[in-house]
Amino acid sequence: MTETFYEVLRRQGITRRSFLKFCSLTASSLGLSAAAIPEIARALETKPRTPVLWLHGLECTCCSESFIRSAHPLTRDVVLSMLSLDYDDTLMAAAGDRAEAIIETVKEKYKGNYIVAVEGNPPLNEDGMFCIQGGRPFVEKLKETCADARAVIAWGSCASYGCVQAARPNPTRATPIKKIITNKPVIHVPGCPPIAEVMTGVVTYMLTFERIPELDRQGRPRMFYGQRIHDKCYRRGHFDAGQFVEQWDDDPARMGFCLYKMGCKGPTTYNACSSMRWNGGISWPVQSGHGCLGCSEDGFWDKGSFYDRVTGIHQFGIEASADEVGGAIAVGTGAAIAAHAAITALSRLRHSEPQNEKQGENA
Ligand code: SF4
Ligand code: SF4
């Protein structure tokens, strides 16, 4: 008989008290109310464990590095207990033929009812020779492993979009998972790497509720990628007031002004960095003084310099009035920013409206 998640966790030494605490942490990280805690507990107590096979293609393993540093040790231990029993190239103890045999066993025993998580992507040039595993191209292993899966999670921007391996001219033809696996749901969890709690949150949601989270048009779970970095950024007040860093070592930089003019891609990037932050909520890139690179957006690596200002901002996020004004006036980024700024900081932004300056520079 197949074990339930709860039985697996108890066998791994996790106490009932820790289990209930985990359910509570899971509910809050998924943005669910306390009413969801018993539902999560019941699901884990009664549902048979869903195996997860974690594959690695062309990548740097930063997604695994992020994942195992999930801020809350309990979450990390519980999620790893759920995963480590099956297959993970970098975390499992087994190696060689014995390790590869695990995939076949899971495929046979859990046909149509296991999840494949993929970190990295397959390179297709020269018959896939740029990524060989067990003596054959990774793309073959990927197709075979996913053949009977219920769903596929694409960890990070490499698996989701291609990322730096796919940068022009993409000599190895590094290819996103979704272009190879076309007959299964593929959930994108992009980022370079993704935030640890986003990864554990997505996999826990899928294992607990046995369903795919609601996705946006880029295939990302809305619960974590539904908001712009810019709309939750603690420097947003400076953007609205037209207070910008102009050089890395100027006084505005020391005062923590907005990094828009230094290339921050927060206005066009959807991720949870500005709300969840990194390393247990300690900090995040903008808080460290560097602009967002937009690493959770498709093609971020091929969009010119990380230090060029964003162009083409058409959305305004949370301020309804700014939305309306922006929508009415919007004829491009400059007009949109000007409309927003007109509401929040008329006088200052008149002298420092960023896109107008950019256009002036380009003229
Ligand atoms: S442009 Fe960047 S630094 Fe400025 S408010 Fe937006 S996200 Fe924050
Ligand atoms: S702040 Fe931007 S570049 Fe940095 S991790 Fe978050 S989405 Fe990626």
Image (cartoon, rainbow, N blue to C red):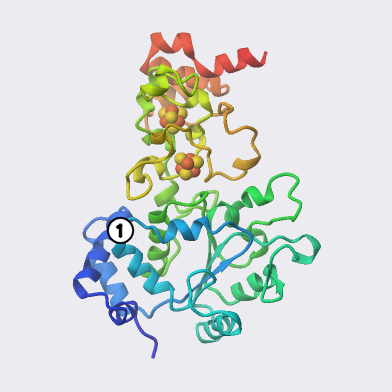
Q: Hey, which quadrant is residue 45 in on the image?
A: bottom left
How many discs appear? 1
Classed neighbour count for the residue bearing mark 1: other residues with Cα under 10 Å, few (<14), some (14–19), many (≥20):
some
Q: Is residue 316 visible?
A: no
In the depicted structure, whether residue 231 falls above or below residue 28 = above
- From the top left corner, tell me how far across and down residue 338 is, in percent: 48, 17
Extreme front residue here?
249
Q: What residue is at 38 percent from the left and 91 percent from the top?
A: 1
> 239 or 150, which is in the foreground?
239
Side of 255 where 305 appears, left or right: right
- From the top left corner, tell me how far across and down residue 56 is, in percent: 58, 65
User: Which residue matches tag 1?
Assistant: 72
Q: Is residue 280 visible?
A: yes
- From the top left corner, tell me how far across and down residue 232 is, in percent: 37, 36
Extreme right residue here?
126
Q: Hey, which quadrant is residue 184 in on the image?
A: bottom right
Q: What residue is at 64 percent from the left and 65 percent from the top?
A: 181
Side of 350 where 312 appears, left or right: right
Q: In the picture, which quadrant includes the C terminus?
A: top right
Side of 184 where 276 appears, left or right: left
**Ligand 1 falls in quadrant:** top left
Amino acid at the residue labelled 1: His
Q: What residue is at 52 percent from the left and 82 percent from the top?
A: 106
In the depicted structure, whether residue 76 falls above or below residue 13 = above
Extreme left residue here?
17
Indicate the secondary structure of the residue bearing disc 1: loop
Extreme bottom residue here?
1
Q: What residue is at 66 percent from the left and 40 percent from the top?
A: 302
In the depicted structure, whether residue 321 falls above or below residue 29 = above
In the depicted structure, whether residue 15 falls above or below residue 67 = below
Side of 175 where 280 appears, left or right: left
> 273 or 287, which is in the foreground?
287
